[in-house]
Image (tube, rainbow, N blue to C red):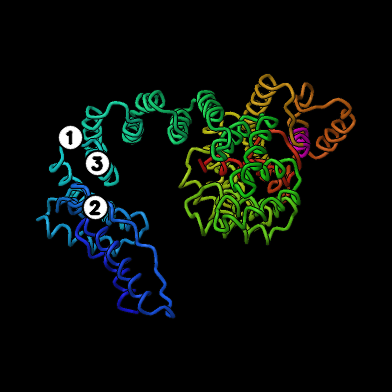
Amino acid sequence: MQFHTRLLEEAPALAANQQLAAWCNSHCILFNLFFLFLYPGSSLTISPPPPPPLPMSAADSKPTPELPIVERRNWLIHQHYIRKDYDTCKAIIKEQLQETNGMCEYAIYVQALIMRLEGKIQPSLELFQSCAILNPGSADNLKQVARSLFLLGKHKAAIEFYHEAARLNEKDWEISHNLGLCYFFIKDFQQHLNIALRINKHDKTFMMLGKVHLLAGETDKAIEVYRTAVEFSPENTELLSTLGLLFLQLGKYQKAFEHLGNALTFDPNNYKAILAAGSMMQTHGDFDVAMNKYRVAACAVPESPPLWNNIGMCFFGKKKYVAAISCLKRAHYMSPFDWKVLYNLGLVHLTMQQYASAFHFLSAAINLNPRMGELYMLLAVALTNLEDVENATRAYEQAATIDESNPLVNLNFAIFLYNHGDKKATLDQYQEMERKVNRLRDNNGNFEFDTELMDMAQKMGAALQVSEGLVWTKPGKDSKSNGNSAAAAKAPGAPLGTNQALGQAMSSAATCESGGGESTRLLNVSLCILLSLF
C-alpha cells in the first residue's frame, strides 16, 4: 500500500520529460485498479499528480554575475558609512584596498571623509588627492580637495581647485558658494555668492551674503538680502530672527516684533529670537517679563554669554546689584574677551562705589575696545574717586577726543574741571556739550534726555552764569531752573556734584538714546551683544 502510494507521488518527479510522466501516470492508475480488484475490501487514497515542471530558459540557467573586484564592497561601505558605523566601515575599506592594491576610488573617498570627520585634515587631503589622480574627471573629488585646503586655511589654493571643479561642472551652486567663502577670508567675496544664488537659491548663501553686506557696513543691502531670503524660505527661523535683530538695531520695533514673532511661531525655543524679544522688553523697563523670556532661553543655551549679560542687567535695573555682578561675572567667565560684559561690570561696580574693581574691569574693556569714548569717561570717574586727578584728566581728554556724539562726556568733563578750579576749560566743555545737544535735536526732533542729566546741566549752566538760552531748559521748569541758579549764585565756589552724583551720571553714560530711568541706561549694550550672534 505505502509502496504504491509513494510511486504515484514520486513517479512524475522522477520523469525526465512530459511524455514519460504521462506514461507513468497511466500505468500507475491501471496498477491501482488491478490491486483493488484483487483486494476489494481495501481502500487507497490517490492524490492528484503535481503539475509538470516549467521549462527553464537559457538565461535562468546562467549563474548570477559577480561585481568586479574593485567595486564589490562599495555598497557595504556605503551602508556602514551612512549608519555612522565608522569602525566597521574602516575595516571593510582596509580589506577592499588590500584586494585592489589601493585602486578602489570609492573606498579611498569614504576613508578620507571619515578622517576629516575625525579631525585629521592633512591625511584626508592626501587621500582626496589620490582620488583625484584615480579619476581626474570627477568634480566631486576636486571639491573635496578644495574643502580640505579651506579647512587648513589655504584659501588661495582652495580657490584654484574650486575653479578647476567649476570647469568640470558649471551648474554646481555649491562650488560658487564655497568660492565665495574662500574669497570672504581674503576680502573679495560678493561676486561668487551672487553667482551661487543665480545658479540655485539656498539659505546658506543668503545668510553669507547678508553677513558680507553687514561687514561692509551696508545694513540696508543686508536687510534687502534677508527679505529676499525670507520670501524664498519663509519658515527659516535663523533668517527671521536675524532680520528681526537688524530691524531692532535700526529702531523699527514693529517690524522687529513681526519677524521675531514669526521665528518664535515656527520654533518657540529659538534662543536668538527669545533674547532679542527679552532685550526689547528690558529696554522699556519690563524686567520681570524679560526675565521670564530668559528663563526659556536658559533651557536651550545655558552657557550663552549674551544671555547671562542680559540677566545681569535685568538685576541691575531692579537694583539687585550683587545678583547683577554674579550673572555678569558668569558671562565674563564664558566670554573673557567680550568688552561689553566688562563695560557692564565696570558700570555696576561704579554704582556700588567699588571704584578699584570698576577701574580693573574698565581698563580691561579699554584694552579690548580702545575706540569707545564712554569707556574712558567711566574710567575717569573711577580715577576721580580714587583721587588720581592727573590720570583722570587724561582719561577725560581721551574720551572727549574720541566721542563726537555723546554730550554726557563733555558734561562730566566740565563738572570735573569746575570742581578743580579750571573755569575756562569748563566753559569750553560746556559749550561743546551744547553743540552736541543741538546736533542731536536737529537729527531727531523726538529726542529725549534723561532728567538727571538735564538737572545736572542746568546746575552747571547756573554755576557758569550761562543759563539764559540754556538748551536744556524745558517748558514748565523755569521755576526749578531759577531756583537752581539762585542756589548756585549763593555759593559759586562750591563743588558741583558729589562722588555719588558723579557715579549716577556715569550710569547714564552708556547710551544717549531715549532715556528711561537710571536703571535702563546701559541696556542697549546687551542688544549690541545680541547683534554679534549672527
**Marks 2 and 3, how far apart at CA:** 32 Å
In the drawing, does residue 199 fall left or right of residue 499? Answer: left
Residue at image mark 1: 137
Residue type for callout 2: Asn
**Horizontal and vertical percent position of residue 303:** 54, 58
Residue type for callout 1: Gly
At 63% from the left and 53% from the top, the residue drawn is 297
Res. 315 visible in picture: yes
Which numbered circle lies on residue 154? 3
Q: Nearer the viewer, residue 70 or 94?
A: 70
At 21% from the left and 47% from the top, the residue drawn is 57
**Horizontal and vertical percent position of residue 164:** 21, 31
Q: Is residue 320 magenta?
A: no
In the drawing, does residue 353 fall left or right of residue 210? Answer: right
- What segment is highlighted magenta in the picture? 451-460
Which numbered circle lies on residue 74? 2
At 57% from the left and 43% from the top, the residue drawn is 530
**Marks 1 and 3, how far apart at CA:** 23 Å
Element carrying mark 1: loop
Element carrying mark 3: loop
Q: Nearer the viewer, residue 119 or 52?
A: 52
Residue type for callout 3: Lys
Element carrying mark 2: helix
